[in-house]
C-alpha cells in the first residue's frame, strides 16, 4: 500500500466511519427533504437519535415517524404492545421503547430477530439489491447468509445500559420469525404498533399472518421495506388479496405508506375500523421504485404530508 493510499484510507475511517458523520449524514442530507424544518428543533428527538444512530439503519425521517407514532399511541392511550420484527442492533426499537417509557404507561415491548443476520432469500425476492443482501443465496433456507448480523447483547446494551429502560417491560426473542411468532402470538396479545422489517417475502408474510389480527383498532402497522424490496411488497399485496382486505395505502412525504383497514378481524368484533399500515423510509442507499405511485392490489399509493399521515384516523 502506498503512503497516499494509506493516508486516504486512514482519513476515510477517521471521518466517514465515525458516529458523528453517520448521524449528520442521516439527519440532514438524507432526511431534510422529508422532514419539516421545525422538527429539527426538537431537542429530545435529536439527543435520542444521536444515542441510537450507531444502532439504526434508518435515517432521521424514519426514526421520527416511529417516534411520532409511538407518542400518538401514548397520547391517545391506545391499548396494546409495541412489537418489532427485525431489530438488528435495536436503534428503532429503542426510539419507540424510550417514548413509551417516558409516558410511564408500562406498555410492553416485544422484539423479535434471529440475531444471526439475514436468512436465505427466495425466488420471490427479485432485484439486484435483494441478490446482494442475500449474497446470491436464494434457497429460502432458515440459515444465515452472513449479512446484517447483530447480537442480543448489542441490543441489551443499548436499551438497558445506555438508555436505562425498564427491563421488565421489554422482551427480546431470538429466533427465526417462522419459529417464534406463532409460538408467542397469544403471549403478546393486543398490539398498538407492529413494525415489520424483515426485507424478504417469507419474513414479511409470516409477520402479517401471525400478528396482523392482534393489532387493535386505530393501531399502526409499519412495513419498512414495502417501497424497496419487491419481495416485501409482494408479501403485503398477496396477504391483502388473500384476506380480501380493501386497504388504501397512502404514501407520506417521508416515503412511508399508510393504510386503513376496514375489515374487522375476528379478535376485535366490536369496532368497525382498523389499523393504519405504514411502510418505512428508505435507508440512505435506497432508490425510489418505479411502482411507487401505481394503483395495485386494491389499494392506492398517493403522496400526502407527514402531518396528515400522523393524523389519519383521528
Image: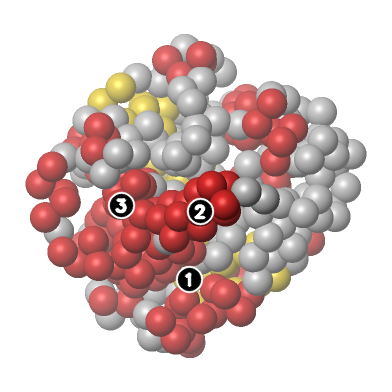
Q: Quadrant of residue 244?
A: top right
* Front tag of 3 and 2: 2
In this rendered view, identify the residue nearer to me: 75 or 282. 282
Left or right: residue 218 compared with residue 210? left
- On the image, the x and y values in percent for residue 1 come to 67, 50
Determine which of the numbered discs, if any, sits on residue 109 in the image: 1
Instruction: Label 1: state its secondary structure.
Output: strand
- On the image, the x and y values in percent for residue 253 come to 28, 30
Instruction: Tell me which label, 3 or 2, sits earlier in the chain.
Output: 2
Q: CA distance from mark 1 to mark 2?
A: 45 Å
In this rendered view, identify the residue nearer to me: 155 or 243. 155
In the image, what residue occupies the spot 54% across and 73% down?
155
Determine which of the numbered discs, if any, sits on residue 54 in the image: none
Q: CA distance from mark 3 to mark 2?
A: 23 Å
Crowding near the residue tagged with mark 3, few <14, some 14–19, many ≥20 C-alpha atoms within 10 Å: some
- On the image, the x and y values in percent for residue 217 come to 39, 50
Determine which of the numbered discs, if any, sits on residue 7 in the image: 2
Crowding near the residue tagged with mark 1, few <14, some 14–19, many ≥20 C-alpha atoms within 10 Å: many
Q: Would you say the residues marked 1 and 2 are in contact, meaning their CB atoms lie under 8 Å apart? A: no
Tell me: residue 304, above or below residue 54.
above
Instruction: Label 3: state its secondary structure.
Output: helix
Determine which of the numbered discs, if any, sits on residue 24 in the image: 3
* Front tag of 1 and 2: 2
Q: Quadrant of residue 134?
A: top right
Q: CA distance from mark 1 to mark 3?
A: 28 Å
Instruction: Label 2: state its secondary structure.
Output: helix
Amino acid at each position: 500500500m502506498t503512503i497516499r493510499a494509506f493516508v486516504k484510507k486512514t482519513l476515510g475511517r477517521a471521518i466517514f466511519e465515525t458516529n458523528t458523520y453517520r448521524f449528520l449524514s442521516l439527519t440532514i442530507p438524507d432526511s431534510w427533504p422529508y422532514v419539516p424544518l421545525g422538527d429539527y428543533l426538537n431537542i429530545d428527538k435529536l439527543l435520542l437519535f444521536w444515542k441510537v444512530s450507531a444502532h439504526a439503519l434508518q435515517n432521521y425521517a424514519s426514526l421520527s415517524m416511529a417516534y411520532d407514532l409511538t407518542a400518538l399511541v401514548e397520547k391517545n392511550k391506545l391499548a396494546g404492545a409495541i412489537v418489532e420484527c427485525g431489530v438488528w442492533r435495536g436503534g428503532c426499537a429503542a426510539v419507540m421503547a424510550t417514548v413509551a417509557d417516558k409516558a410511564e404507561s408500562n406498555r410492553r415491548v416485544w422484539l423479535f430477530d434471529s440475531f444471526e443476520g439475514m436468512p436465505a432469500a427466495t425466488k420471490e425476492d427479485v432485484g439486484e439489491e435483494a441478490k446482494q443482501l442475500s449474497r446470491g443465496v436464494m434457497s429460502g433456507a432458515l440459515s444465515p447468509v452472513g449479512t446484517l448480523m447483530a447480537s442480543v447483547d448489542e441490543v441489551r446494551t443499548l436499551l438497558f445500559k445506555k438508555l436505562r429502560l425498564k427491563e421488565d417491560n421489554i422482551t427480546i426473542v431470538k429466533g427465526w420469525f417462522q419459529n417464534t411468532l406463532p409460538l408467542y402470538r397469544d403471549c403478546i396479545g393486543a398490539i398498538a404498533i407492529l413494525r415489520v422489517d424483515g426485507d424478504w417475502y417469507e419474513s414479511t408474510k409470516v409477520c402479517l399472518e401471525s400478528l396482523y389480527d392482534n393489532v387493535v383498532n386505530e393501531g399502526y402497522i409499519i412495513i419498512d421495506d414495502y417501497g424497496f424490496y419487491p419481495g416485501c411488497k409482494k408479501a403485503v399485496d398477496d396477504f391483502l388479496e388473500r384476506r380480501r382486505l380493501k386497504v388504501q395505502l397512502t404514501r407520506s412525504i417521508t416515503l412511508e405508506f399508510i393504510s386503513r383497514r376496514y375489515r374487522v378481524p375476528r379478535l376485535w368484533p366490536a369496532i368497525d375500523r382498523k389499523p393504519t399500515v405504514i411502510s418505512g423510509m428508505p435507508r440512505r442507499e435506497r432508490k425510489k421504485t418505479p411502482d411507487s405511485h401505481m394503483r395495485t392490489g386494491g389499494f392506492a399509493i398517493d403522496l400526502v404530508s407527514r402531518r396528515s399521515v400522523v393524523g389519519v384516523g383521528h
